[in-house]
Amino acid sequence: MQKLLPEEIEKRSFEIITKELGGILLDEEQAFVMKRVIHTTADFDYVENLCFSEDVVKKMQEAIRNGACIVTDTQMAKAGINKKELSKYGGEVFCFMGDEDVAAKAKEKGSTRAAASMEKAAVLEKEVIFAVGNAPTALMRLHELMQEGVVFPKGIIGVPVGFVNVVEAKEMILKAEVPYIVARGRKGGSNVAAAICNALLYGMKHRV
């Protein structure tokens, strides 16, 4: 078995993905996001499941260039996002799930920490892209906050995974007036959320 360096493995992986996609034509702006999600999951179903609002890649990348931050609903997603690359544009990655005030607010209101963490993110004095990979309640509360005029996301990456309220929460975002990248159906995860964020960041320099 041939030994390869990490960058060679990634290059070879993307070559295999491109080959296996065959005659499937991907939108030029979306292709590098789609391929990175497939690279992360080895799941070609995302070709059908991953939904993009109009010009969302350009819009989110422009927001990042202007210093937008990313708020996630898991420490796993936060760990997976390339914070060094984001910092080049002045952005940071936040996850408030473990904060004591978030836990206290969730207990007081009888809500989830994920929902309470979105409320905390809503008062950040920063432009924000939300990357939700685990909790549908985060998407649902985010949708409510948008309807209330409390928060105005520069974009939403809605890819929670699971069975309860997951499909419904994603459909809410698909109908909202906000730039979105959503994995329709049950599939997703924190790794997918991080992969999409990184694809946006890496795509600002080059595309594979």
Image: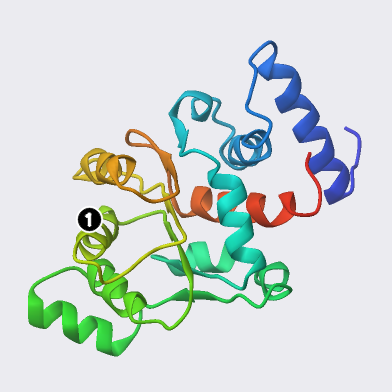
Q: Residue at x 21, y 59 (%)?
A: 147
- Point out residue 27 in the picture as x, y percentages from the top left corner: 63, 28
Q: Is residue 124 left or right of residue 20?
A: left
* Quadrant (top left/top right/bottom left/bottom right) for the N terminus: top right
Q: Is residue 9 above or below residue 191?
A: above
Q: Quadrant of residue 83?
A: bottom right
Q: Residue at x 74, y 74 (%)?
A: 88
- Point out residue 57 in the picture as x, y percentages from the top left corner: 59, 46
* Quadrant (top left/top right/bottom left/bottom right) for the C terminus: top right
Q: Residue at x 19, y 66 (%)?
A: 148
Q: Nearer the viewer, residue 81 or 66?
A: 66
Q: How is the image coloured?
A: rainbow
- Point out residue 62 in the picture as x, y percentages from the top left corner: 63, 59
**Residue ranking furthest to the top:** 23
Under mark 1, the amino acid is Met
Q: Quadrant of residue 23?
A: top right
Q: Is residue 82 above or below residue 180?
A: below
Q: Residue at x 52, y 68 (%)?
A: 78
**Residue 81, visible in the rendered structure:** no
**Residue 10, visible in the rendered structure:** yes
Count up the numbered dots: 1
- Secondary element under disc 1, as helix, strand or loop, is helix
Q: What residue would you read off at disc 1?
A: 140
- Point out residue 143 in the picture as x, y percentages from the top left corner: 25, 57
